[in-house]
């Protein structure tokens, strides 16, 4: 179950592939626009069946360790990729060690009950430098506090159980400050 928690992070970032985006708003506005970004489970939509592959992302901050998981998964299949991240205002800098690729997107979260598909309450939008964007959805109570909170989330929402299987909640060994990364498309859809 602990690995599932990180898998949720991957769906939110999925479908991004980007460069640099210029930010025009103030730091206070940026902070308000990313309030629900971290330690929250985000998915592209509710799965319709146990075999329905959905994108998910979880961006975690655990004791100062900033990492996340992005991917696609169902109850029966998972494709996950771990990444490091830094948030500066609304600019989310992503570092993917497997391919040594980095990128940057603008992140925005907001309360969107009534606007989002049922049964979601929160929206997350990533926008790249070219203006392409992708949305993910969540509930206000889909907060990742620890491994037990992921277990409880999957028990309360059986359709999400596949997202959390095989997910580690501990930070991978990742020293992004000492690694060399190339600018390029992020390994996301």
Image (cartoon, helix red, strand yellow):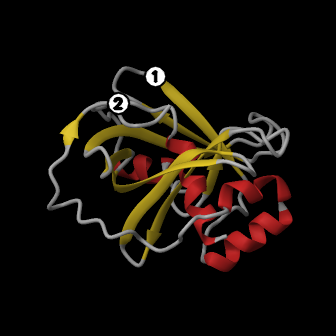
Q: Measured from the top left, where is residue 161 in percent x and y?
A: 76, 59
Which residue lies most toward the front here? 76
Is label 2 in a helix, a strand or a loop? Answer: loop
Q: Residue at x 72, y 46 (%)?
A: 74
Q: Measured from the top left, where is residue 145 in percent x and y?
A: 60, 75
To which quarter of the image does residue 67 belong?
A: bottom left
Disc nearest the viewer among 1 and 2 = 2
Give the numbered dot on residue 18: 2
In what quadrant of the picture does the N terminus appear? bottom right
How many C-alpha atoms fall within 10 Å of the one at disc 1: few (<14), some, or many (≥20)? few
To which quarter of the image does residue 135 belong?
A: top right
How many C-alpha atoms fall within 10 Å of the one at disc 2: few (<14), some, or many (≥20)? many
Q: Is residue 33 above or below residue 157?
A: above
Tally the numbered discs.
Answer: 2
To which quarter of the image does residue 106 belong?
A: top left
Q: Residue at x 52, y 50 (%)?
A: 80
Horizontal arrangement in the rendering, residue 61 relative to residue 87 (left or right): right
Q: Is residue 150 above or below residue 69?
A: below
Is label 1 in a helix, a strand or a loop? Answer: loop
Q: Measured from the top left, where is residue 99 in percent x and y?
A: 30, 44
Q: Measured from the top left, where is residue 187 in percent x and y?
A: 40, 37
Horizontal arrangement in the rendering, residue 49 relative to residue 44 (left or right): right
Q: Which residue occupies the foreground of this view, 188 or 98?
A: 98
Give the numbered dot on residue 132: 1
Horizontal arrangement in the rendering, residue 182 relative to residue 74 (left or right): left
């Amino acid at each position: 179950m602990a690995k599932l928690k990180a898998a949720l992070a991957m769906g939110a970032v999925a479908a991004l592939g980007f460069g640099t985006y210029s930010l025009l708003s103030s730091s206070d506005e940026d902070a308000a626009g990313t309030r629900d970004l971290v330690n929250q489970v985000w998915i592209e939509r509710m799965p319709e069946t146990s075999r329905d592959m959905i994108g998910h992302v979880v961006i975690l901050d655990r004791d100062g360790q900033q990492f996340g998981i992005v991917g696609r998964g169902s109850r029966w299949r998972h494709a996950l990729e771990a990444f490091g991240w830094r948030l500066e205002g609304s600019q989310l800098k992503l570092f993917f060690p497997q391919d040594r690729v980095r990128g940057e997107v603008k992140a925005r979260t907001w309360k969107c009950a009534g606007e989002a598909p049922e049964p979601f309450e929160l929206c997350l939008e990533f926008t790249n430098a070219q203006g392409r964007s992708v949305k993910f959805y969540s509930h206000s109570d889909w907060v990742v506090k620890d491994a037990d909170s992921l277990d409880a989330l999957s028990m309360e929402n059986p359709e999400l159980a596949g997202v959390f299987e095989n997910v580690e909640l501990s930070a991978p060994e990742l020293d992004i400050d000492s690694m060399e990364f190339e600018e390029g498309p992020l390994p996301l859809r």
